[in-house]
Image (cartoon, rainbow, N blue to C red):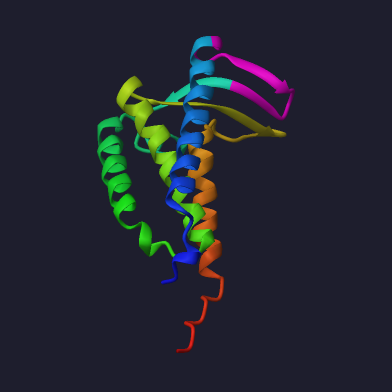
Amino acid sequence: MSTARMLPAPLAWGVIALLFVADQASKWVVVHRIGFQEGVPVIPGFFGLTHVYNTGAAFSMMHDSNRFFTTLSLVVFVALVFLRKHFAGLLMQWGWVLILSGILGNVTDRLIRGHVVDFLDFQFGSYHWPAFNVADSCICVAAGLFLLSGFMTPDKPAKS
């Protein structure tokens, strides 16, 4: 694997730190400025901020499984750190950065608060999407990058 296809480690870890801080800062603001289960409309009928929490996985699946998801998140985070070299190519590298950022943000919530703080709240007509946060967004974009990279043609090895 060519090292040119890897993000420089300081850049990767710097972006992880920046996204982690953005996630935690946004959650701090929500926790300290919006009452629990209170909503603040931003674009009425489309987007608002609603302070809720989640002790399960996406869409509150496996509700009240905080200990399980904390353990799973920590194991996956450590494994991904050690497997970085297997994320070849820039799409995979950026996916690696985003997924680590998301895991770190949500596991921090689980360890400190006992739940994940969600607050980004979208609705489309009568359809209401479950609230999510910056870390969740990082994880979803990472999944999209991993999927997209699967459709890319791998680089051919240089002829010697």
Residue plotted at (30% across, 48% down): 76
Is the residue 105 above or below the residue 25 in the image? below
* 75 relative to 6 in the view: left or right: left
Residue plotted at (53% across, 17% down): 30
Quadrant in the picture for residue 137: top right
Residue 26 image point, x, y percent: 54, 23
For the image, the number of numbered tags is 0
Residue 70 image point, x, y percent: 29, 35
Residue 50 counted in the magenta span: no
Residue plotted at (49% across, 65% down): 5
Judge by depth and name the residue closer to the eye, 99 or 97.
Answer: 97
In the rendered image, the quadrant that contains the N terminus is bottom left
Magenta part of the protein: which range?
33-49
In the rendered image, the quadrant that contains the C terminus is bottom left
What is the residue that sits farthest to the bottom in this orientation?
A: 160
Judge by depth and name the residue closer to the eye, 35 or 137.
Answer: 137
Residue 43 counted in the magenta span: yes
Is the residue 116 above or below the residue 154 in the image? above
Judge by depth and name the residue closer to the eye, 113 or 160.
Answer: 160
Residue plotted at (33% across, 22% down): 112
